[in-house]
Image (tube, helix red, strand yellow):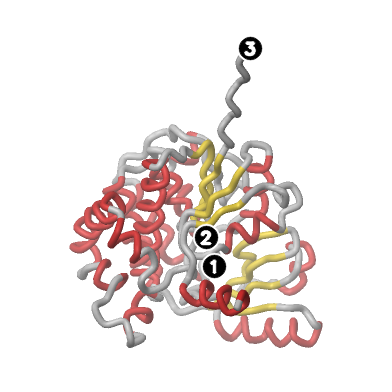
Amino acid sequence: PGTAAPEAPRVAFLFSGQGAQYVNMGRGLYESEPLFRQILDECDAILRPLLGESLLALLYPVQTNGENGQTKLDETRYAQPALFVIEYALAQLWMAWGVQPVALVGHSVGEYVAACLAGVFSLHDALALVAARGQLMQTLAPGVMLAVSLAAEALKPYLNAELALAAINEADRTVVAGPPAAIATLEAQLQSAGIAHRRLHTSHAFHSAMMEPILADFTARVARVRLQPPTKPYLSNVTGTWITVEDATDPAYWARHLRQTVRFADNLTALSGAVDLLLEVGPGHTLATFARRHAALATRPMLTSLRHPQEAAADLAHLL
């Protein structure tokens, strides 16, 4: 008698959030993979009138020795669309290669890629919303985000009206967001207490009270697009568990999503019973690292799609 073919592993796609972007991310794929190039070209054409310039020109500049391109790509209005288009194109490429995800999860703006792939937004509408989101955020006062090696409960005494718990990435790793002066005070407190912390590569205090001035405008902007029930399972940063039809199709949910805590550690817990393999679909390996340190996922295989050139160089130097 024949033996049954082994079942394909259940794969989850993980979509990175802001701070992971860098100039030339995915350039090799853009030059060598027609499908990846076609999708980026299509997205660039849709975004150009919304951004006022070509996103591709920022991603893949002719001159790469200056820092101007990276400086612009660090601006929220460009960073968020750039991450979306790279992650969306990578996901389409993986699926064209036969890797079909059974679950999707994004971190902050990464949830828009998950929702788009699940059919909540059309590609055109998702790009318009991500561009609007980034532009509205860009109008706000600058803020700071600080990664802290503390559990959410242990962090509570350090928070106040200005400082928000922006993300719970792991059981003992959180992110605080707030105005620069309030974050500087927190840094001094953490330093004196011997608690590890570091500033993140962002321009604004996402998922904090500093986002509140744009919530009504963004809710109105989302209300102008057609929101459809998701056709693929994906996880909600807001609730920490699987998205519901009610939330996915509610414009107010997407406003809460940019203000409330990113419950990524809870997302990983929910994911642990549903998948065998995790694939980070975006630049770097931040989300795979969070997953690798999660007790319920530590033994699962984890793959990444792109590596930052500096990371690759560090790996090579270590091997040599």
Residue type at mark 2: give it. Arg
Tag 3 residue: 1
Residue type at mark 1: give it. Ala
Q: Quadrant of the C terminus?
A: bottom right
- Return the x and y of residue 275 as percentages of the image width and height: 62, 39
Front: mark 1 or 3: 3
Figure quadrant of residue 109: bottom left
Tag 1 residue: 209
Q: Tag 2: Cα neighbours inside 10 Å, few (<14), some, or many (≥20)?
A: many
Residue 182, placed above or below residue 156: below
- Name the mark on residue 115: none
Residue type at mark 3: give it. Pro
Residue 194, placed above or below residue 136: below
Q: Secondary structure at mark 1?
A: helix
55 relative to 212 in the view: left or right: left
Front: mark 2 or 3: 3
Residue, x 57% and y 50% (percent of image)? 238
- Return the x and y of residue 282 as percentages of the image width and height: 46, 58
- Return the x and y of residue 253 as percentages of the image width and height: 48, 47
Residue 254, placed above or below residue 191: above
Q: Earlier in the sequence, mark 2 or mark 1?
A: 1
- Name the mark on residue 259: 2
> How much space separates mark 2 and mark 3, taking CA atoms?
58 Å
Q: Secondary structure at mark 2?
A: helix
**Tag 1 and tag 3, C-beta contact below 8 Å:** no
